[in-house]
Image (spheres, rainbow, N blue to C red):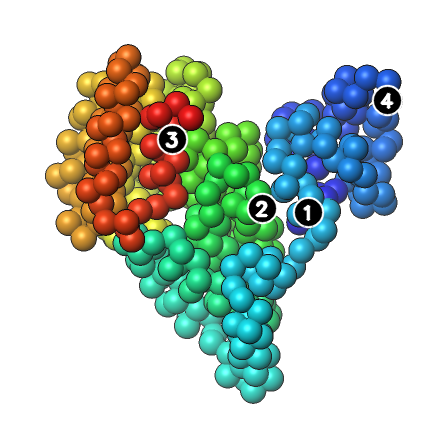
Amino acid sequence: MGIGELIRDLRRAQGWSQGGLATRLTESAPGYNMSRETVSRWENGKIKPGPFWLGHLAAVLEAPLAVLENALKRRTFLTDVAATAIAPLVASDLIEHGFSARLGGLAPDADDWEGKLAAYGTQYMSLGAADIQRRLSGELVVIQQQLDEPRLWSVAARLMTLYAKTFPGSDGSKAVNWYLMAARAADRSGDEQTRVWVRGRASIALGYEGASLDVATMFADQALAISDKPSLGLLNSVMGKAHAAAIRGDKVISLAMAEEGRRIFDSAGSCEQTSDYAVPYWRMNVFLSLLFARLGRERQALEAQEASAKELPATLPRFATHLEMHKGLMIARAGDQAGGYAFAKAALDELPPEKHSLTLRMLLDEIRGK
């Protein structure tokens, strides 16, 4: 995504006109005057904002500065992956493999890629973030050589979304930037379901983590604007928006979104139990457990925890840890922050380190009040 497109999307997410953004930028920089025409030229790619205005854009649009800087550099799939995840020699081997497959006509077809995607969705539920990141890095370097048809753009978008989950959303740079690129790739696919799912997964990931709340809400609103048909993507969008509202203290919106999420789940819930691309009954209740804990609704949180624990597969101990840590958050919200943190940390310590996730660490920080 270029800087102009990102400014436009973030401006629209705030509900502002180009003139409205110009006014807010002028207010944020006393002594300087920003015009609507300049904002228009930024968005149309005729000029690019310099470092001074880039900083003010980040503040006014409530977007991480690193995301805007990355968009300004217009990184490709390859440079993003090679620069952040894999060593140069490994990248060289992967690039060679990608071109060789392309030139030799041996590239995996769309069905092969769909099979890989399904496997990664299952592996993500039990493997650590670093392991998944290394594997996905290679796949992204290869598939970026093979984007010949809309269906492959759909696969790439979903792989990128999963890849984004391997970065901590709290730093606001790599994770959000990858979600933004994934949304663009989904749009290139032309597939409505993919477009909604990618945005929904980004929204629930950031909302659940309590990171980049405005971006989480933006993705949710975009998904809702694309389609109101019950789907897992729409469910993730609504629940992501519910968590963002809960953290902001907007209980009315949060509870309304939770009820909407229940309604969508009744139509679109998954039978598949162990994939990141699925939302079965136990996982829906993990979402609700944390949401109600954040809202201080202890009885509802405990009901969700009990319902989830009954059906949670024994092969997924990380999610059992989530539920225990939600109890720690409830203790903290009830007034005993030290006790809540101790309870949550003890639960996390019982989980083998290789099973830890970035999301769990961020949840521990939330309980501690960091």
**Mark 4 vs mark 3, CA separation in Å:** 39 Å
Q: Mark 2 points at which residue?
A: 177
Mark closer to the chain start, 1 or 3: 1
* Alpha carbon separation for disc pair 4 and 2: 29 Å
Residue that numbered label 4 is attached to:
32
Return the disc, 1 or 2, that comes first in the chain's sequence.
1
In the image, residue 159 lies at what x, y percent?
Answer: 47, 58
- Residue closest to the far top: 335
Q: Distance between the residues labelled 1 and 3?
A: 29 Å
The reply to whether dot 1 and dot 2 touch (C-beta < 8 Å) is: yes
- The kind of residue tagged 2 is Asn
Q: Is mark 2 on a helix, strand or loop?
A: helix
Can residue 33 be seen? yes
Above or below: residue 366 compared with residue 279:
above
Can residue 23 be seen from the camera position used here?
no
Please state which amino acid type lies under the numbered disc 4.
Tyr
Sort mark 1 into few (<14), some (14-19) or many (20+) by Cα contacts within 10 Å. many
Residue beneath the point at 81% across and 17% down: 30
Q: Residue at x 39, y 43 (%)?
A: 358
Question: Which element carries disc 3, helix, strand or loop?
Answer: helix
Residue 12 image-quadrant placement: top right
Looking at the picture, tell me which residue is in the foreground, 175 or 273.
Answer: 175
Q: In this view, does 262 lie to the left or right of 32?
A: left
- Residue placed under numbered mark 1 in the picture: 71
What residue is rendered at 36% in x and 38% in y?
Answer: 361
Name the residue at 62% across, 28% down.
Answer: 62
Q: Which x, y percent locates residue 56?
A: 73, 28
Q: Nearer the viewer, residue 286 or 96?
A: 96
